[in-house]
């Protein structure tokens, strides 16, 4: 396997991991599991806001999964993760497990996209 193929494969695996987790996250919000409402209340939001956030996240997920719109999806996910980070900072959540979780997901989303898409690597070159 050539270096370019190996890089693309690693990118697809990272993207697949992100997509699997984000699909689960969207699904529990769309089916309105009681845990989602309880978590929203603990974070200081209305209990039923989980459905609205789930719909926004579903749009971001679809955009990320479609190759032609994957970069837009990654940008929008970055905004969602930023909101989650701000929320966890506001309620004084633990740093590494809660506040930085959005950073971890952002690295997974962008890392996967960067490694699987040569156009993204051209746009965001890493200088050696």
Image (cartoon, helix red, strand yellow):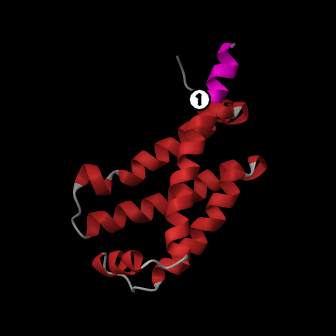
* Range covered by the magenta-colored residues: 2-9
Rendered location of residue 69, percent (x, y): 74, 52
Quadrant location, the N terminus? top right
Tell me which corner region of the image, top left, top right, bottom left or bottom right, holds residue 63: bottom right
**Residue 113 vertical position relative to residue 9 in the rendered view, above or below:** below
Estimate the x, y position of residue 22 in percent, counting from the top left. Answer: 53, 57
User: Is residue 7 toward the left or the right of residue 90 in the image?
Assistant: right
The reply to whether the magenta stretch includes residue 103 is no
Q: Residues within 10 Å of mark 1 (few under 14, many from 20)?
A: some
Label 1: which secondary element: helix
| Residue 84, quarter of picture | bottom left
In the rendered image of this protein, does residue 87 appear above or below residue 50? Answer: above
Q: Is residue 93 visible?
A: yes
Residue 54 x %, y %: 55, 72
State whether residue 58 is above or below residue 15. below
Number of marks: 1
* Residue on which the image places disc 1: 10
């Amino acid at each position: 396997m050539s270096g370019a193929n190996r890089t693309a494969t690693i990118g697809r695996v990272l993207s697949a991991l992100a997509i699997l987790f984000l699909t689960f996250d969207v699904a529990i919000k769309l089916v309105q599991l009681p845990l989602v409402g309880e978590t929203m209340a603990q974070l200081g939001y209305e209990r039923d806001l989980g459905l609205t956030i789930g719909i926004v996240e579903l749009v971001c997920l679809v955009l990320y999964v479609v190759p032609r719109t994957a970069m837009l999806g990654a940008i929008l996910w970055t905004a969602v993760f930023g909101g989650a980070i701000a929320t966890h900072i506001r309620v004084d959540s633990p740093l590494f497990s809660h506040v930085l979780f959005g950073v971890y997901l952002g690295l997974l989303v962008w890392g996967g996209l960067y490694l699987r898409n040569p156009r993204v690597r051209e746009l965001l070159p890493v200088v050696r």
